[in-house]
Amino acid sequence: MPESSTTSPTESVRHGVLALVCTGLKLPLQVLRSAAGYYIGTQNDEGPISRESVEYFPSHAAAQLALANNAWTQRDHS
């Protein structure tokens, strides 16, 4: 019998903690870019909402790998 799940662990949607706490918006984590480098954060149709990762990454690929492997640090929301 085939499995009922259609997503793999790396495809599971994770949401930004800071975006939720600060704005009430439940937005998916994604790789974004700023002048300082690539980071893990959230955005909506109007633009970036939150930088969730403490780290900045040197490339999109490095940030994507960190996101996929959960190898990044969540910024504090207190």
Image (cartoon, rainbow, N blue to C red):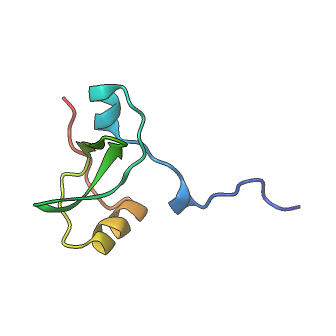
Count of numbered marks = 0
Q: Residue at x 21, y 44 (%)?
A: 75
**Which x, y percent locates residue 6?**
69, 57
- In which quadrant of the rendered view does residue 66 lie? bottom left
Q: Residue at x 43, y 46 (%)?
A: 28
Is 38 located above or below residue 78 in the figure?
Answer: below
- In which quadrant of the rendered view does residue 47 lie? top left
The image quadrant where one finds the N terminus is bottom right
- In which quadrant of the rendered view does residue 18 lie? top left
**Which x, y percent locates residue 46?**
31, 40
**Which x, y percent locates residue 13?**
50, 49
Q: Residue furthest left?
A: 36
Taking 36 as reference, is 65 left or right?
A: right
**Which x, y percent locates residue 62?**
29, 72
Q: Nearer the viewer, residue 3 or 50?
A: 50
Q: Nearer the viewer, residue 54 or 38?
A: 38
The image quadrant where one finds the C terminus is top left
Q: Residue at x 22, y 33 (%)?
A: 77
Q: Residue at x 60, y 61 (%)?
A: 8
Q: Nearer the viewer, residue 63 or 49?
A: 49
Q: Residue furthest right?
A: 1
